[in-house]
Image: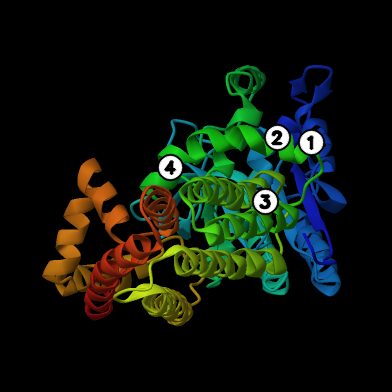
Amino acid sequence: MGENRPDTVAVVLAPTHTARLACADTTLVDRLTEQLAALPVADLHIVPDEQGLAEELRQIAKIAKGAAAAGAPLAVLAGDVVAHTEALAVLLEHPSRSTGALVGPRVANPACTPVRAEHGRVAAAGNSFHQVDVPNATFRGVFQVGPDQVKAFALVADELAGLADSGGLGAAGPHEAADLLLAGLVRSGVQVRATGFGRLRCDRVTDQAAADLALLRLDEVDEDRVRLDAAVKQDDGFFTTYCVSSWSWRLIKIADRLGLTPNAVTGISVGVAAIAAIWFSAGDRQSQLVGAACLYLSFVLDCLDGQLARYSRRFSPLGAWLDATFDRVKEFVVYVGLALGYAAGAPMTGVGPDGIWALAAGAMALQAIRHMIDFSYAGAVTDAAKVGVSWARPHRSLAMAVDSVRSTTDKSTEAAAVQRENTIVQLAGRLEGDTATRWLKKIIVLPIGERMALIAVTAGLFNARVTFLALLGWGAVACLYTLTGRIARSLS
């Protein structure tokens, strides 16, 4: 991870009615504990429910207070969960270590309690007492509380224990502890990320027949292939998707077996880009073609470092900074190499070699402006989201069965948002529905994959002058398109 941070404290709730369910030569609870041993879990607690719901919740609150003192995240798993280890890892090994819950589609399984997910967050969570208005997903029995929220979670557990003592949770039983705690966490105003698990399995069972079926379904999925597929970005540019990611996933396991870190792959990518620049600086046709091939290879490695990081879950702030920084360094070094090669081989007439440096500087400046637009807008969106969430989710009472916030604040806010959408934003939304126009939208903004392809093709087949003119022309259109879209979305 690149940081010395406390590992997760895990709590497995072992309800009496499922604790003895068989799983091969062991039990479901034992299977869960074995899976957690393969994950970054430092401290594991098994909490039985023989003493009743209130006492179970108090034990969880006590464990949470210990985790809060250690600055560690806390994971809570219902003992009736049958899941792929990779499905658990999607949540428990996420680099942000933020608060989140595993949620899946709605299913005809009473053990999977209803939730409502909005904008990637759990907006409401239910159980036999707490009701959910317009549920659209189900909770799959596993959630994690980030280090910053563990102390608040302990207070929620204590509050629920008090309600259980006084009969304030209706007929809720000890087997619902995880569902009650998630509902309490959401109603306390904590952001809970709704984490999906894709083609992987994560089910909850109530009897031996359901457990046997869930275990059989685990074998229907190639867990490692799903992990490989998940390492490849699903929403990338056209060139990256079809000319790089379509085959680069085969390199992920090779790099992992060789013991390469994502940062090491980033460094190799920089070295190959420098080699490309050296070949470009020679100026002759053969050298230009070799430089173009090296540039493509450098970009493949640039994609591979992120894929390897996602596959191995070896993330760090340093790695993210290096990747973003060296993307720009590599591109600008290649610009310099192209300009040197053109200046060395161009006839001393017209705009000649001196003009090529002006074009190179212009291409660099335009790209710097485009990066500024992207980063400043992304930062503004992040800041706005933080402010919005801090005000939009007030604390709601755990003693009330019905969460009335949805029927007032949320619905009126959504209606106002739809009315505010301007023509440009509505048009962009309609274009997303068609495959061809969606790819066109991605291509027109000249993302890094298309830029690398443009540089390689124009430099290899023509010369640096054509390369820079193409970058300036297409880049200007992309800049105008992006700026128009950003302004339209800001005003909507």
Q: Is residue 203 visible?
A: no
As measured in the structure, the alpha-carbon distance from the residue carrying label 3 to the one carrying label 4 is 18 Å
Give residue 309's mark. Answer: 3
From the viewer's perspective, is residue 328 above or below residue 428? below
Q: Which residue is under mark 2? A: 253
As measured in the structure, the alpha-carbon distance from the residue carrying label 2 to the one carrying label 4 is 19 Å
As measured in the structure, the alpha-carbon distance from the residue carrying label 1 to the one carrying label 3 is 13 Å
In terms of sequence position, does the residue under pointer 3 or pointer 2 come before the other? 2
Q: Amino acid at mark 4?
A: Thr
Residue farthest to the left, as pictured:
423
Q: Which residue is under mark 1? A: 257
Residue 475: x %, y % from top left: 31, 68
- Judging from the image, the colouring scheme is rainbow
From the viewer's perspective, is residue 457 above or below residue 423? above
Q: Amino acid at mark 2?
A: Lys
Left or right of 352, for residue 251: right
